[in-house]
Image (tube, rainbow, N blue to C red):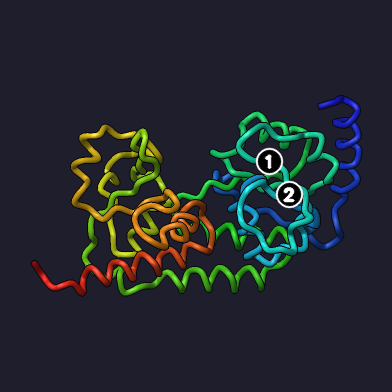
């Protein structure tokens, strides 16, 4: 990162940061940190696929000037520059996009890159949802930061209403979440997928473990063999699992479809005659 580029950004940032008369907005991100804008965001860069989908849900797609690598996006976004991903951030490229708001993934992007973004004065929203409620909250927050509140509110309400299912009222069936097979990895209680399971009529067999994703011994996986296996590996656990695995790979409004698929599976099990 050249000093000249950084200095140029700081000068440009001072210009972009001039307040628009009569408008100012502040929200808290998923870490509880304040994110303030003196004008509605016009140039948004997302550093994770789920962040891109949340901006789209909030009606801010026309504000995107750079999106995260990976993910499935509409054809209309094919020409947008790809920025970020699991590796180091291309800081020079980010500066050329002149964002006034960056939406990042707290646990998926490099901490040093996020600290740099804040240090040079770009507004940064750190996304780290732990429940389905956080997804709706982020949609609303993006709506406020883009001055697009009515559209975002409708999307958030539509998402929340779709979470009401009959399966959530039924006894919860034990489920084993297969994140990886070699080594065997699953999720503990500190993951938003647990919320998906509850709305679908399941409970995580390893939900008592206060962790996110972690490795388990072969013996533990053997004990879980009698539970419903929900695989996050595309092409595993039966036909059509690729779609389910894709939906469960990121915290977006698409999880309502995942809940529907899991609920249908739950109801099919309940309809089977007792052995």
The answer to whether residue 39 is left or right of residue 200 is: right
Q: Where is residue 212 in the image (x, y as percent from the top left)?
A: 40, 40
Q: Which of 38 and 252 is in front in this view?
A: 252
The answer to whether residue 31 is left or right of residue 240 is: right
Can you tell which quarter of the image residue 211 is in?
top left
Instruction: Give the answer, above or below, for where 193 lies relative to 200.
Output: above
Asked if residue 34 can be seen in this view, the reply is no
Mark-to-mark CA distance, 1 and 2: 9 Å
The answer to whether residue 187 is left or right of residue 11 is: left
Q: Position of residue 141 (x, y in %)?
A: 63, 58
Q: Position of residue 111 (x, y in %)?
A: 61, 31
Which label's residue is closer to the chain start, 1 or 2? Answer: 2
Q: Position of residue 106 (x, y in %)?
A: 57, 40
Kindly state the secondary structure of the residue where label 2 is placed.
strand
Q: Residue 94 carries which label?
A: none
* Mark 2 residue crowding within 10 angstroms, few (<14) / some (14–19) / many (20+): many
Kindly indicate whether the residue at mark 2 contacts the one at mark 1 (C-beta within 8 angstroms).
yes
Q: Nearer the viewer, residue 180 or 104?
A: 180
Q: Which of 228 and 151 is in front in this view?
A: 228
Instruction: Give the answer, above or below, for where 111 lies relative to 131.
Output: above
Can you tell which quarter of the image residue 196 is in?
bottom left
Kindly state the secondary structure of the residue where label 1 is placed.
loop
Residue at the spot 42% in from the left edge and 48% down from the top edge: 233
Q: Which of 186 and 20 is in front in this view?
A: 186
Residue at the spot 30% in from the left edge and 34% down from the top edge: 216
Residue at the spot 81% in from the left edge and 34% down from the top edge: 92
Q: Residue furthest left?
A: 275
Residue at the spot 10% in from the left edge and 69% down from the top edge: 274
Q: Which mark is residue 45?
A: 2
> Label 1, on which residue?
84
């Amino acid at each position: 990162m050249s000093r000249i580029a950084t200095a140029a950004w700081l000068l440009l940032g001072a210009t972009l940061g001039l307040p628009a008369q009569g408008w100012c907005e502040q929200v808290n991100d998923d870490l509880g940190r304040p994110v303030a804008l003196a004008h509605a965001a016009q140039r948004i860069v997302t550093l994770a696929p789920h962040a891109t989908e949340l901006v789209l849900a909030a009606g801010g797609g026309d504000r995107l000037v750079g999106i995260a690598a990976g993910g499935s996006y509409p054809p209309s976004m094919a020409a947008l520059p790809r920025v970020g991903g699991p590796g180091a951030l291309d800081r020079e490229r980010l500066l050329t996009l002149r964002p006034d708001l960056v939406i990042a993934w707290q646990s998926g992007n490099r901490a040093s890159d996020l600290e740099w973004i804040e240090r040079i004065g770009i507004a940064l929203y750190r996304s780290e949802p732990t429940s389905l409620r956080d997804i709706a909250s982020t949609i609303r927050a993006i709506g406020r930061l883009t001055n697009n509140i009515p559209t975002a509110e409708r999307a958030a309400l539509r998402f929340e209403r779709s979470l009401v299912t009959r399966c959530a009222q039924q006894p919860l069936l034990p489920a084993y979440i297969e994140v990886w097979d070699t080594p065997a990895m699953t999720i503990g209680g500190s993951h938003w997928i647990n919320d998906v399971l509850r709305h679908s009529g399941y409970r995580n067999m390893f939900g008592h473990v206060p962790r996110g994703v972690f490795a388990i011994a072969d013996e533990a996986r053997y004990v879980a063999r009698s539970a419903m296996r929900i695989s996050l590996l595309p092409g595993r656990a039966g036909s059509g699992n690729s779609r389910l695995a894709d939906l469960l790979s990121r915290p977006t409004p698409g999880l309502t479809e995942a809940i529907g698929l899991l609920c249908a599976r739950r109801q099919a099990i309940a309809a089977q005659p007792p052995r």
